[in-house]
Image (cartoon, rainbow, N blue to C red):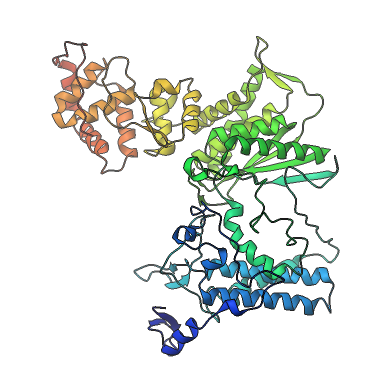
């Protein structure tokens, strides 16, 4: 213990001081291992952190092998004592109220342990509020132990909440819980019926066929969150606090062989590549098969007029394709979709602030066959109409693309199938691409008042890509859908427009290999930027290589747009800004230029400065 924070009684300000000898002695004297067991369970959880889990439970990478070891002795003594008190209170309450009500109250109390563990475990850090200039209230609190939604971080230097009062203590976290519970009780009508909760697997629901009116699910998004692995930290403490009051939950039936939650049927992707090596959940094919099984099971238990709602959010169109295909194959049709701001999380795949709720129903036995031309027109019109509302709601362009998939399938779902004039069935992927194109067209991007559709296909793609992602890497699946939106092939874009990276693809901003009359406008302006260091004549020579008019409005519109989109300090932006300032000179030089050519191919060589 290096320092102690407390409130100065005279100034009411927080001060930091060195710990007193009696405080150090008391802290070091904590010994939770002297506490009695919980019906055979150790007072401090000794359940092991599984091998290879250090990406989710970081302490295991430093030799902390059990979930109980993630706390220091003072903290584990506090939690073990609290868990025992909750068990004792349940015994007392069960003498005066029903066992079910006593168990519910014990459950509320135990949920407080979880909230305290988040902020009173080795690995917690400072959570500072306010502003350095004092413009806002300046406060320092203890932060939680998660560095993302499912990564339990570890630090050798950490903030520790006190056992009495202050942020992160029982008194602090219980106050907000009681306020929330009071609000629920006050707003619940006395004639309301109690809810019934059952734990089961999504691939084996405990209901008879055709007996459920509505089913709502929020399936895991591939490898975004390792739910069970990160929540095992709380599960082991729950077993000790609630093992007596909720025996049906903690009788071992939910445990794996290691005493942690059984993960045999967990539908996630547990890491990719080396991170998931040896774990049965690391297979994407398994994830998709299990997800399909869960939808088939939902179809079994729903009534004929029942409703299914699926909440989903993912930046990769391939993930959406597999989800919607699984729904369709299970016998559902999409009937509605709406985007919602539900969560914010850096997931490794995207930063999701919007998820989409997909409404579905059991496919009617008789639906008409759709004609592709009419269905296409309906999809385009519906998505464009929705875009106006999404724009008004401030939905980001990337989120509009994600929301468009469900909107398109709500139209397609009206039909048993959609066929072309030749009788071929139109695949699901086509309508996802069509929906993306409708969003792009609805955005009505204009470059110097010139509609985007008046530019060449490669430049259209580059501008739309830049609008969405700038210089960021884009997964291969997303890049492929980008290409399909303009009837282009990803293979043809690799090199002229895109460069392949480990994470996928990235929009090129450097000099093209060469500029010819067949080059896109986007390649020409990159060539111009790369040659700026050699002077206006060199820039003019690029225009001549492209066989463009020096006053071509589309050329200068792309230059203006890209220069405005890039940071002012970006080398390409600096070069394009200089070209704009010297526009008249460049145009004059290009009009009369007769620069030497490369005898090999008749074009001028381009040298990159970037």
Foreground residue among 286 and 383: 286
Which quarter shows the N terminus? bottom left
Vertical side of 38 occupied by 401: above or below:
above
Q: Is residue 537 left or right of residue 194?
A: left
Location of residue 445 (image quadrant):
top left
Return the x and y of residue 266 as percentages of the image width and height: 65, 47
- Can residue 442 be seen at all in this image of the molecule? yes
Depth check: give the residue in front, 299 or 351. Answer: 299
Q: Quadrant of residue 610?
A: top left
Q: Residue at x 82, y 68 (%)?
A: 100
What percent of the width, then of the height, locates residue 466? Answer: 39, 35
Does 534 sit above or below residue 599?
Answer: below
Q: In screen coordinates, is 219 left or right of 66?
A: right
Observer-nearest of 3 and 78? 78
Q: Is residue 510 left or right of residue 374?
A: left
Q: Is residue 455 visible?
A: no
Q: Position of residue 353 (x, y in %)?
A: 53, 48
């Amino acid at each position: 213990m290096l320092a102690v924070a407390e409130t100065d009684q005279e100034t009411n300000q927080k001060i930091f001081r060195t710990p007193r000898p009696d405080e150090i002695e008391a802290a070091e004297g904590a010994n939770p291992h002297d506490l009695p067991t919980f019906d055979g369970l150790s007072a401090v959880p000794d359940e092991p952190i599984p091998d290879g889990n250090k990406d989710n439970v970081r302490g295991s990478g430093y030799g902390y092998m059990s979930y109980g070891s993630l706390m220091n002795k003072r903290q584990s003594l506090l939690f073990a004592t609290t868990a025992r008190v909750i068990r004792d209170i349940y015994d007392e309450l069960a003498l005066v109220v029903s066992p079910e009500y006593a168990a519910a109250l014990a459950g509320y109390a135990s949920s407080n342990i979880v909230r305290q563990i988040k902020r009173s475990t080795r690995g917690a850090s400072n959570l500072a509020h306010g502003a350095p200039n004092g413009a806002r209230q300046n406060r320092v609190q203890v932060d939680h132990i998660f560095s993302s939604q499912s990564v339990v971080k570890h630090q050798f230097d950490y903030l520790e909440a006190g056992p009495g009062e202050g942020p992160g203590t029982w008194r602090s976290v219980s106050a907000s819980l009681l306020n929330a519970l009071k609000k629920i009780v006050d707003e619940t009508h006395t004639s309301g019926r109690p809810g019934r909760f059952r734990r089961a697997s999504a691939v084996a629901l405990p209901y008879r066929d055709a007996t459920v009116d509505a089913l709502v699910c929020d399936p895991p998004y591939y490898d975004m969150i390792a739910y069970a692995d990160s929540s095992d930290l709380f599960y082991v403490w729950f077993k000790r606090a609630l093992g007596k009051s909720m025996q049906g939950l903690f009788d071992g039936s939910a445990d794996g062989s290691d005493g942690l939650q059984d993960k045999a049927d967990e539908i996630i992707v547990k890491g990719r590549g080396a991170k998931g090596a040896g774990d049965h959940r690391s297979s994407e094919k398994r994830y998709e098969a299990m997800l399909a099984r869960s939808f088939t099971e939902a179809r079994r238990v729903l009534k004929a007029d029942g409703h299914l709602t699926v909440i989903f959010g993912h930046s990769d169109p391939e993930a959406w394709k597999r989800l919607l295909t699984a729904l369709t194959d299970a016998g559902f049709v999409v009937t509605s979709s709406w985007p919602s701001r539900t969560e914010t999380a850096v997931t490794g795949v995207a930063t999701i602030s919007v998820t989409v709720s997909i409404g579905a129903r059991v496919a009617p036995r008789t639906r008409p066959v759709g004609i592709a031309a009419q269905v296409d027109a309906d999809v385009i019109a519906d998505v464009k109409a929705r875009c106006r509302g999404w724009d008004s709601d401030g939905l980001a362009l990337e989120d509009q693309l994600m929301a468009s998939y469900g909107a398109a399938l709500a139209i397609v779902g009206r039909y048993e199938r959609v066929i072309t004039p030749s009788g071929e069935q139109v695949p699901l992927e086509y309508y996802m691409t069509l929906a993306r194109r409708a969003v792009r067209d609805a955005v009505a991007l204009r470059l110097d008042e010139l509609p985007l559709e008046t530019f060449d296909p490669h430049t259209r793609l580059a501008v739309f890509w830049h609008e969405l992602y700038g210089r960021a890497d884009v997964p291969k699946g997303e890049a492929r859908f980008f290409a399909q939106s303009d009837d282009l092939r990803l293979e043809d874009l690799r090199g002229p427009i895109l460069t392949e990276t480990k994470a996928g693809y990235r929009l090129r901003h450097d000099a093209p290999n060469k500029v010819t009359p067949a080059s896109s406008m986007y390649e020409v302006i990159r060539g111009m930027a790369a040659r700026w260091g050699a002077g206006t004549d060199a820039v003019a020579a690029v225009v001549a290589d492209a066989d463009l008019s020096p006053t071509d409005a589309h050329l200068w519109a792309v230059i203006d747009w890209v220069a405005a989109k890039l940071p002012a300090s970006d080398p390409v932006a600096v070069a394009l800004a200089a070209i704009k300032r010297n526009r008249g000179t460049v145009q004059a030089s290009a009009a009369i230029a007769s620069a030497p050519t490369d005898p090999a191919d008749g074009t001028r060589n381009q040298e990159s400065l970037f």
